[in-house]
Amino acid sequence: LPAQGAVYYLFGATGDLAKRKLFPALFSLYKEGKLSDNFAVIGLARRSRTKEQFREDVYESITEFCRYKVDDVELWNRFAEHFEYMPLDINNVEAFRDLNRLTSELDARFNIPGNRLFYLALAPSLFGPVSFNLRDGGLLESTGWRRVIIEKPFGYDLPSAQELNNQLSQVFKEEEIYRIDHYLGKEMVQNIQVIRFANAFFEPLWNNNYIANVQITLSETVGVEERGGYYDKSGALRDMTQNHMLQMLTMIAMEPPSSLIGEHIRDEKVKVLRSLRPYATSEEVKKNVIRGQYAAGKQQNEELPAYRAEDSVNPESATETYLAAKVAVDNFRWAGVPFYIRTGKRLPVKTTEVVIEFKSMPQNVLFAQRHDLAPNLLVIRVNPMEGIYIKINAKTPGADNSVQPVAMEFCQSCQIGLNTPEAYERLIHDAARGDSTYFTRWDEVAQAWEFVDRIAAAWKENTDDLKLYPAGSWGPEAADELLARDGFHWWPVN
Ligand code: BG6
């Protein structure tokens, strides 16, 4: 079903996210018939631009970043006609009244039934002021629905997130707020529930009787790029762990929801977050959470600078670009099963994957007597490769009865002609249809901050434990010791 007609307000329309993700997503949706023809997009930013220039920006972004080519001129022209631009000083309520007038024109021109989707691709400190001016400028007084999509980071810690949420809730109801975590828009993250709950192979085994540990890796090859100013204040804890890493963990650990209704799924996810065992002392943080920062190094013969030498980064920065942690989920299903998570920049490969390691067969009987049997693994590959594989033990062909691990693989991304939708397409489409399943609810955000804040507090006390690792390596060795202590190791990523 195409989404209902609406006016889309893109705050931050000249920014990087709009260029790389949002324009391409809108174009793909349009091309696939998921955007009805009665929509309009208003680009909003400080900079002055004409409508024509803006459409040109949109065109360039789509040619560079969209999975569809602009090969049909007529279709492009029809699409582009829906785009308007207005320079906006977000502190000036008068400008919002002008915006409201433009909106009425667009409602009439495109036959839009008063629905409003506000996309705030802005710094979090602007969410409050923009919301107030939307209200005071009369933009919320239409007859249709209104929804606001908010980009991460949602706050800097629990108190600031609370403050932000208080401001937003003066203007929007919780069900009108769509907090983006784009990892939840990824195909394979959504697939976790299907793999778990639609397979007799896995569901009965999904607990501490059969699972030895869970490993979630999100590694990146890039450094901080041009985002030093933002990243130096966030680090891997706030940029990746509070959101993407913990969200993936909830999808793996949650109980079966009572239905596929978004609220039911989110109810189960928040329960996982409530069950995370908090690190009680700074010592516990030190023992269970490893932080690293990349030093100068080499990747495929390219010399890479140290994090501290990057643009807009404090030359004495103690910000972590790598984090590995042992996390305990204290509930009946998971008691005693460690979840190891790791994420970092300037690692050797770009990959996100989840490894479920099953418990070993009883030692010293049958085959295990003569062979050090490898445990069974289920690997869920999230990106850039998408698919799953399982590792089982089988007989090595031949007369000597030996056993070898073999892999059975389903590679979704290898399928010819498959053009997987980008996370942002799915999420924008969901928001426009009023489906908030794959957005984070306030209680999830708050719980995640509560967990993360303890780590941040311990780290602030003392930076002795920050380990440097050469760019292009797999991070500090301490991350290996974290698992070795429990008799495990990180399974190499593919
Ligand atoms: C973003 C982080 O949320 O996710 C970035 O702010 C990171 O630092 C990015 O690079 C990774 O997303 P993806 O989809 O490229 O794996």
Image: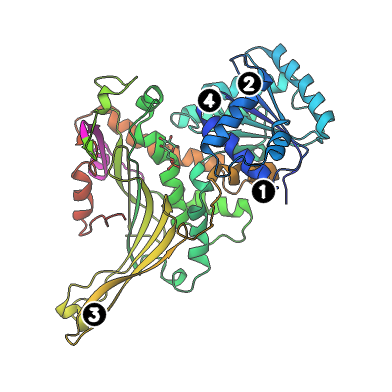
- Residue that badge 3 annotates: 396
Name the kind of residue labelled 3 in the image: Thr
Q: Earlier in the sequence, mark 1 or mark 3?
A: 1
- The answer to whether the residues at label 3 and label 4 have Cβ atoms under 8 Å apart is no
Which one is earlier in the sequence, the residue at label 2 or at label 3?
A: 2
* Residue 75 falls within the magenta-colored stretch: no
In the rendered structure, which disc, 1 or 4, sits on the residue that comes first in sequence?
A: 4
Q: Nearer the viewer, residue 70 or 443?
A: 70
The structure residue drawn at horizontal position 46% and vertical position 32%, both measured from the top left corner, is 158
Say which of marks 1 and 2 sits in front.
Answer: 2
Work out whether mark 1 precedes mark 2 in sequence or the reverse, and give the earlier one: 1
Residue type, label 4? Gly
Mark 3 surroundings: few (<14), some (14-19) or many (≥20) residues within 10 A: few
**CA gap, disc 1 to disc 2?**
25 Å
- Amino acid at pointer 1: Glu
Give coordinates of residue 339: x percent, y percent: 34, 54
Against 231, residue 424 (above or below) is: below
- What is the secondary structure assignment of the residue under circle 3? loop
Task: Estimate how packed mark 1 is, as few (under 14), some (14 to 19) or many (20 or more) residues with alpha carbons within 10 Å.
Answer: few
> In the rendering, at what x and y percent does residue 193 appear?
51, 60
Of 374 and 197, the residue lying toward us: 374
Which residue lies under the disc numbered 2? 53
Which color mode does the image show?
rainbow
Name the mark on residue 15: 4
Which residue in the protein does label 1 denote?
A: 32
- Residue furthest out toward the bottom: 399
Name the residue nearer the viewer: 249 or 370: 370
Identity of the residue drawn at 80% across and 35% down:
112
